[in-house]
Image (tube, grey):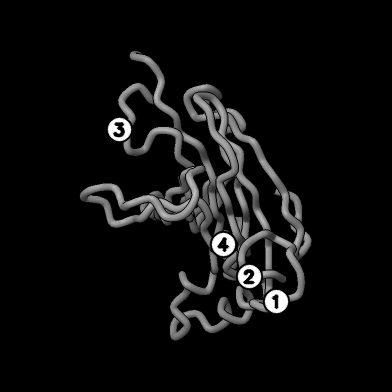
Amino acid sequence: MPTTRTGTVTTYTVPSLAASGGVGAMLRVVMYDDGLARDFKPRLQRALFVSYRARTPAPGFDSGLPLVWDQRVFLHQYDGVAVPRADPWTTPTYLLGLLDAAEGVVTAIPGEPLPVRRSWVYTPLNQINANLRPDLVAKAGSLGSLNISFVAKNGTHGTFSVCRFVALTESGNDCSDGVDN
């Protein structure tokens, strides 16, 4: 993702994983690297992945996707390196949220801990242990947050908007996030 200017809404359309064969099927947003060099290997990065999943007829790629996950945006966080892979294989991926194009908050998926929303605010400071890594708190705090909103969907593509903001002040209608910046 190109550098996002504060307060500017950028709209992306990505194919579903099934329709794309995995090519161009997600947006990777690198928030920052962790600042630790590891034997001259690339630094680990805090990255947010935004992808779209839609059921397909059997035996298609997502033919087994549960209906409650059909035509939803998935938000994952991964704290590793894309290529070359320098992180341990045990580095986890976190499912942070699910988005639907419906207005408001959709009821949570039964048995699942995540509510499904139309918009979601990603704040990197929420995922940092300030006692263990005060250096990352200083780095991430100035970056601000991302507002990701699901705009439209169909069986093959999902459209969402991304807006970066650094302050929670009312000064206009930038970002259309209810927290104008």
Measuring from the top left, give residue 86's x and y in whole percent.
52, 52
Amino acid carrying label 3: it is Pro
* Residue plotted at (35% across, 22% down): 63
- Residue contact at pointers 2 and 1, CB within 8 angstroms: yes
Q: Mark 3 — residue?
A: 66
* Residue plotted at (23% across, 48% down): 110
Q: Mark 4 — residue?
A: 39
Q: Mark 1 — residue?
A: 170
Does residue 163 appear anywhere in the picture?
yes
Q: Whole-Å distance between the Cαs marked 3 and 1?
A: 40 Å
Does residue 93 appear anywhere in the picture?
no
Secondary-structure class at tag 1:
loop
Mark 3 / mark 2, whichever is N-terminal: 3
Q: Is residue 176 or residue 70 the one in the foreground?
A: 176
Mark 4 / mark 2, whichever is N-terminal: 4
Amino acid carrying label 2: it is Val
Mark 3 vs mark 1: give the one in front: 1
Secondary-structure class at tag 4:
loop
Amino acid carrying label 4: it is Asp
Above or below residue 114? Residue 181 is below
Measuring from the top left, give residue 118's x and y in whole percent.
50, 51
Q: Whole-Å distance between the Cαs marked 3 and 2?
A: 34 Å
